[in-house]
Amino acid sequence: MRNRRKRAPDPYDGILLVDKPTDWTSHDVVAKIRNNFKLSKCGHGGTLDPLATGLLVLLIGKGTKLSDRIMNGDKVYEGTLHLGITTNSQDADGEILEEKDASHITRKMVEEVIKAKFMGPIEQIPPMVSAIKKDGVPLYKMARKGQEIERDPRKIEIFEFEVTGFENPLVQFRVKSTKGTYVRTLAHDIGNELGVGGSLDALRRTGSGPLSIEMAHTMEEILACDKETLEEKMILLSDMIK
């Protein structure tokens, strides 16, 4: 049996904040940076869908021990709700299931529904296209086979939910919520409450706990570094525990 060659210990421990581009999975980003810099330990502190962009926290070396702390922080997102379109994934990546006329919907109607139904502690049924597992099988694998099973609602809390722009059928918004919130499900459910359906057209994570997108670096900026200068873009574990 051939012995697997072990990578050298990572030269630093901490977190790296990435501005994830669209169409990349969170795993794609981790794999690219781990392999490019030949890192032994590299993970992320909270998944973003391929459609989404924005703040992805990479945990490097002993920084992986911060996973729970990073993932438990409240999240801030900016997104676009498309009224009148329902998809099987609840976002623009999915198959369109139904289209309805939403031309009568006003900004005030959207804001009233948000205020009445989507503020404070609420329950949310996770989408079928998600990594949640049922009997050890991720739901998205069942969804690919056309299966749909009953999902238990999850308790989340919405702290802030603001409509930042409206040009029917598109609604721009900013939301701050607890971890585990599916923003595409919020878009889907708001559309249903308005009677026209809805899906998520775009999503950008701008905050996770005390971390913000302004602190993040693009993939181009990161990959332009070598293994030594990458440290300059990191928040080192030694600085975080002072």
Image (tube, helix red, strand yellow):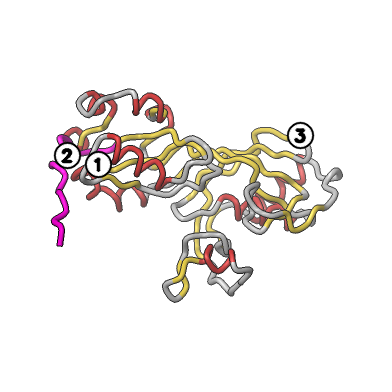
Q: Residue at x 23, y 40 (%)?
A: 39
Instruction: From the viewer's side, name the closer residue of 156 and 147.
Output: 147
- Which three-letter amino acid code belongs to the residue tagged 2? Asp
Q: Mark 2 points at which residue?
A: 10
Q: Picture quarter containing residue 51?
A: top right
If you read the primary sequence from the N terminus, does the residue marked by circle 3 or circle 2 appear first?
Answer: 2
Up-down relation of residue 227 to residue 132 (above or below): above
Q: Across the whole image, how many numbered discs are drawn on residues? A: 3
Region of the chain picked out in magenta, as a range: 1-15
**Residue 4 included in the magenta stretch of the image:** yes
Q: Which residue is drawn at 74% across and 58% down?
A: 97
Disc nearest the viewer among 3 and 1:
1
- Which three-letter amino acid code belongs to the residue tagged 3? Glu
Q: Position of residue 158 (x, y in %)?
A: 53, 50
Q: What element carries label 1?
A: strand
Q: Residues within 10 Å of mark 2 (few under 14, many from 20)?
A: some
- Which three-letter amino acid code belongs to the residue tagged 1? Ile
Q: Mark 3 points at which residue?
A: 167
Disc nearest the viewer among 3 and 2:
2
Q: What element carries label 2?
A: loop
Pointer 1 with pointer 2, Cβ within 8 A: yes
- In the rendered image, the quadrant that contains the C terminus is top left
Instruction: From the viewer's side, name the closer residue of 32 and 203.
Output: 32
Left or right, 176 with respect to 108, comes to: left
Quote the CA–CA distance across marks 1 and 2.
Answer: 8 Å
Q: Residues within 10 Å of mark 1 (few under 14, many from 20)?
A: many
If you read the primary sequence from the N terminus, does the residue marked by circle 3 or circle 1 appear first?
Answer: 1
Q: Mark 1 points at which residue?
A: 60
